[in-house]
Image: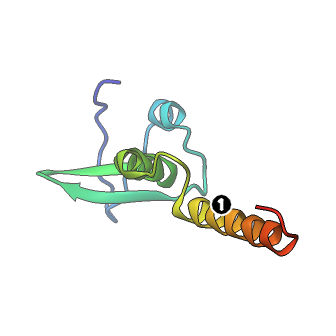
Amino acid sequence: MTAIRAKLGAQGRVVIPASVRAAVGLKPGDEILISVEDEGVRIATVLANLRRAQAIARPFRPKRGSAVDQFLASRRREALAEERKRRGGF
């Protein structure tokens, strides 16, 4: 989408044009995050920022499930081994 010109109101308010709101799925009452970046201002939805953070973290995610999943699988294997040992199996 190309840049759209808007004016800053007397109380510092900016009206986000309908075409921009529609393009990013903004509706009245939605939360947005405003940040200062370089020499400008960035307005993004909370969901967009969440997806951005997830994309940044994705390469660091364990390949075989979460640490909790790995821990639980380990405990299940241990419990199964103990049960087999208790019953006289191996």
Res. 15 visible in picture: no
What residue sits right under mark 1 in the picture?
73
Q: What residue is drawn where x is 66% and y is 69%?
A: 75
Residue 9, picture quadrant: bottom left
Q: Residue pushed farthest left?
A: 39
Q: Secondary structure at mark 1?
A: helix
Counting from the top left corner in percent of width and height, residue 33 is at 40, 59
The amino acid on which the numbered mark 1 sits, given as a three-letter code, is Ala
Q: In the rendered view of the protein, which quadrant contains the C terminus?
A: bottom right
Give left or right: position of 85 versus 68. right
Counting from the top left corner in percent of width and height, residue 57 is at 38, 52
Q: What residue is drawn where x is 60% and y is 46%?
A: 27
State whether residue 70 is above or below residue 82.
above
| 81 and 23: which is toward the camera | 81
Counting from the top left corner in percent of width and height, residue 72 is at 65, 66
Q: What residue is drawn where x is 36% and y is 45%?
A: 59
